[in-house]
Image (cartoon, rainbow, N blue to C red):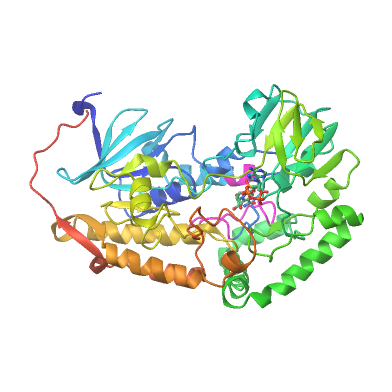
Amino acid sequence: MTAEATEHFKIAIVGAGFGGLGMAIRLREQGEEDFAVLERDVDVGGTWLQNTYPGCQCDVPSHLYSFSFAQNPGWSRTFSPQPEIWDYLRRCADEAGVRPHLRTGCAVTDASWDADAQRWRLETTLGPISADVLVAATGGLSEPSVPELPGLERFEGASFHSARWDHSHELDGERVAVIGTGASAIQFVPRIQPMVDRMHVFQRTAPWIMPHTDRPITPLERRFFARFPVLQRLLREAIYWARESFVLGFVVNRRLMRMPERIARAHLHRQVADPELRAKLTPDYEIGCKRILLSNDYLPSLAKPNVELVTDAIAEVRERSIVTADGTEREVDTIIFGTGFHVTDQPVAEHVRGRDGRSLAQVWADEHGGSAEAYRGTSVAGFPNLFLITGPNTGLGHTSMTVMIEAQIEYVLDALGKIGRDGIAAVDVRPDVQAAENAAIQRRLRGTVWTAGGCESWYIDPNGRVTTVWPDFTFRFRNRLRRFDLGDYDAEPAREREREPVAA
Ligand code: NAP
């Protein structure tokens, strides 16, 4: 491709999940049409397009796990199943008129800041693009992580990750190994248990599991929400505040987590009669240290005669079997990885290069020992006009990510209003401002359930820093991002430049 073919947009958004789609919808609502949404997959949806495993369902209540600006009175359950969330996102894209801006099958392979031209230059699988502003909404849980088990490459059976479920593969009558017992596995294990001949569930760490309160939303309730949207909004608010109260236990006083811990313990006792199995399923760390899981059918499924819970470490994978550290060899036809995602080592960080040509990953390695760091989870010093949606320290263990995403979207909109005004072409967060905020976040994390709760989790990066979680109430995050403060940024005036040829 030559420079002649470079298309230019005011804003390029990478990713069409909740983050990228929400950004696009709000841009259109503001009358902005000069943007493109670049999505590597076949449609909008992000994680809700990619995760199609049996039983996939959101563990945050439907009325809160949706855009505040696009309420859905039609949710069929209090916790939405994946197909319904995906449908909802597609409908949002259609109704907001985002489709003409969407490029699917468009993977961004490189994004570099061109300091002379004061714009981002993107290499994509559909050709080069340039943009004044880059919004990276690539999602925190989009790159499946498959552990490097010794001998895995020799395995001759089928294997796939929960986020890349192979629906063409019949599991009926098979001997199946499930590796991992996190949020995804506890949803698909009960679904596949009745169909498989044998299932070995390999558990490294026992999760805390609470009773699930999921139920169908009646047609009457749905008609009610459609007729009186304000009532659905009030319910949303009530759910929001009830869930914020968890922060008190996570951050302020960990003793408050004793009550949920007691509920989870009683749930385990009620659901698992065998004391040996129950012992294996009892976590040895504080509840909340890892994501608290909700299920009424996972624990009973482990007690079924065709299921074995294996707690010995995996030593080796052979052609048709898995061998554990105690020397036991279990023959399996298929391995399903419910082993989570690359979170603190996201590949996107390798592909975005800033002012001095270094990638985000390089800058974080050189300046923070490999720990990801951003300002307000959104801007990174040295990366002008780059906005991350769900960047470092924006993750949550207790409520809906849409709260954080919407706060970031409004922040970017405010920034866009300021870029371009008064002749400003680029904004770059001041390193001292970013450092001060991150020092405060790390101070705030001390003594929280994530750092002192006695577990290892993907919230913690290899340096022992929690770079994923927002350690506070989400309304504080929202308040911090209410205004884009130009004083926190170095603003670059627009330079005279030759007009570049643009594609027809
Ligand atoms: P996860 O919660 O990170 O769980 C991964 C599981 O794999 C853990 O049990 C982990 O054990 C195990 N594991 C990882 N590497 C392993 C290895 N080398 N050997 C043995 N076991 C290994 O992943 P996930 O279940 O896919 O969920 C990820 C996140 O996605 C969740 O925390 C949640 O935020 C989100 N999610 C949300 C929903 C929802 O309903 N909204 C549903 C699914 C997922 P350890 O605990 O010992 O590390």
Residue 259 lies, with reference to residue 229, above or below; the image says below
Q: Nearer the viewer, residue 91 or 374?
A: 374
Q: Would you identify the image quadrant in which residue 26 lies?
A: bottom left
Name which residue lies at 27% across and 47% down: 354
Quadrant, the N terminus: top left
Side (left or right) of 223 relative to 401? right
Query: Which is the main secondary structure of the residues drawn in magenta?
Result: loop
Point out the image quarter for the C terminus.
top left
- Camera-side residue: 350 or 25? 350
Residue 416: x, y in percent?
A: 27, 56
Q: How far across and how far down the image is residue 464, in percent?
A: 51, 59
Residue 316 position (above or below residue 263): above
Q: Is residue 21 above or below residue 273?
A: above
Residue that appears at 82% across and 62% down: 267
140 relative to 365 in the view: left or right? right
Specify whether residue 249 is painted magenta: no
Q: Which residues are magenta?
A: 64-85
